[in-house]
Amino acid sequence: MEMNVQKWVRLARGIGKSLLNEEDKQMDDEVSEWVNESNRGKRILGELRNLDFYVEKEARKREIEKRYSWEEFMTWRRHYERHRKLLVVRCVAAVVILFFVSTCVWFANRGEEKSQFMFPSEIKPGCMRASLILNDGQEIILDKRLSLMESDSSVVLSNEKGELAYRNVREKSGESSINTLRVPCGGEYQLMLADGTRVRVNSESELVFPTCFNSDRREVFLKGEAYFQVAPDSDKPFYVRVNDYIVKVTGTSFNVTSYTDDPCAMTTLVEGKVSVYGNDSTWNCDLTPGHMLKFDKGTARVTSEECDPRIYISWIDGEFKFRDMRLEDIMKKLNRWYDFEVAYEEEELKDLRFSGAAEKYNPVEFLLKMIEEVTKVHFDIEGKRIMVKNN
């Protein structure tokens, strides 16, 4: 029987509860119906109740990781991409059940580690939080519903459900006010500009923008990272200025990363087309979807390369995704979200590389444990400090 994804999710939760509840083996009605309607359901449930099943799957995963490189896997994935639409529901269902149930059983059968995850350290995941600095320097913490109006009644701004929105209520000439959205470590926020452009601002970032766009160009200034969905307007190009270059668009979706402590600034194009050029106009580069521009701050070298944009915009979907990334860079990215201190027992540990993915609202211990499983490191957590050691 073909099932939709929502039903698989409900089944996964029901199976997980029945496996974890040792005192009460009774299953809910939907799980019982699924188990009894075919031998396949009975076989799957039997496997999930057998701890050897998880040991075998883990061993198989490790064997695959040793035998196949990431590039080989990507070649295989592209080869079968044309079949993806036919398989998507079954694949999602399998992943949901295996991940949810495996995680539940893993927690249940590792008492010491269960305690670590169920009662995490002082390090907490980030959340929707930011502050707004008005043109007169007044700072407003965006932790509640808010409604303000410009003194000339031309612009209304409101804050609700994690989004700050500006709206022009009538046209006006002259200068608009300049506001700043400041997102601290352990935060993120969404902004809708007066022209309808949406901006998702990441942790430890700052966006400077006008309350309305009255000139023949729309321009904002970014420190840190943000994802833009620019409202189309061919008569008013949209510019994003960072410290090292300028991005020009008319209507498109892209991600810009320009942290002061990162060696490179990057622009990743998801949809549309952008032009990127240096502040001194000595270079320029046009990007098409699925390509990324890198600006090396040390050498001023500019490169453009093909990429999977989903890796670089995963943060807006509540995920961390790493592909062959240095451990130091991973910890820097995690630090911006979880807000902790990090130290290394040996400098060589910074250059270890890791590929993986995890939901960013999980406790930090969850992701660190994943890294420990595939690299030769161990993480000691004391308060809000993480020490990276050789394993």
Image: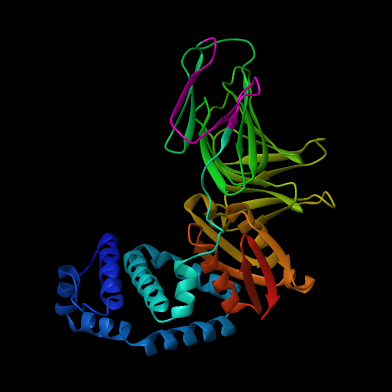
Q: Going 54% across and 9% down the picture, which residue do you hit?
A: 152
Where in the figure is residue 369, as x and y percent of width and height?
55, 73
Q: Is residue 41 above or below residue 30?
A: below
Identified at 22% across, 79% down, the residue is 41
The quarter of the displayed image where residue 244 is located:
top right
Looking at the image, residue 2 sits to the left or right of residue 190; the answer is left
The quadrant of the rendering that contains the N terminus is bottom left
Q: Quadrant of the C terminus?
A: bottom right
Of 376 and 114, nearer the camera is 114
* Residue 69 in view here: no
**Snapshot quadrant of residue 42:** bottom left
Taking the spot 64% from the left edge, 38% from the top edge, the residue there is 206
Residue at point 61%, 17% (across, down): 176
**Which colour scheme appears in the figure?**
rainbow
Q: In the image, is residue 166 above or below residue 380?
A: above
- The residue at the far front in this view is 383
Q: Position of residue 328 (x, y in %)?
A: 70, 64
* 45 up-or-down from 195: above or below: below
Q: Position of residue 63 (x, y in %)?
A: 53, 86
Locate residue 250, reporting x and y percent: 58, 32
For the image, the number of numbered tags is 0
Q: Is residue 109 magenta?
A: no
**Horizontal arrangement in the rendering, residue 148 relative to residue 28 (left or right):** right
Which residue is the extreme one toward the right? Answer: 299
Give the magenta-colored segment's residue range: 132-152
Residue 205 appears in the figure: yes
**232 sits left or right of 331 in the view:** left
Nearer-the-camera pick, 214 or 277: 214
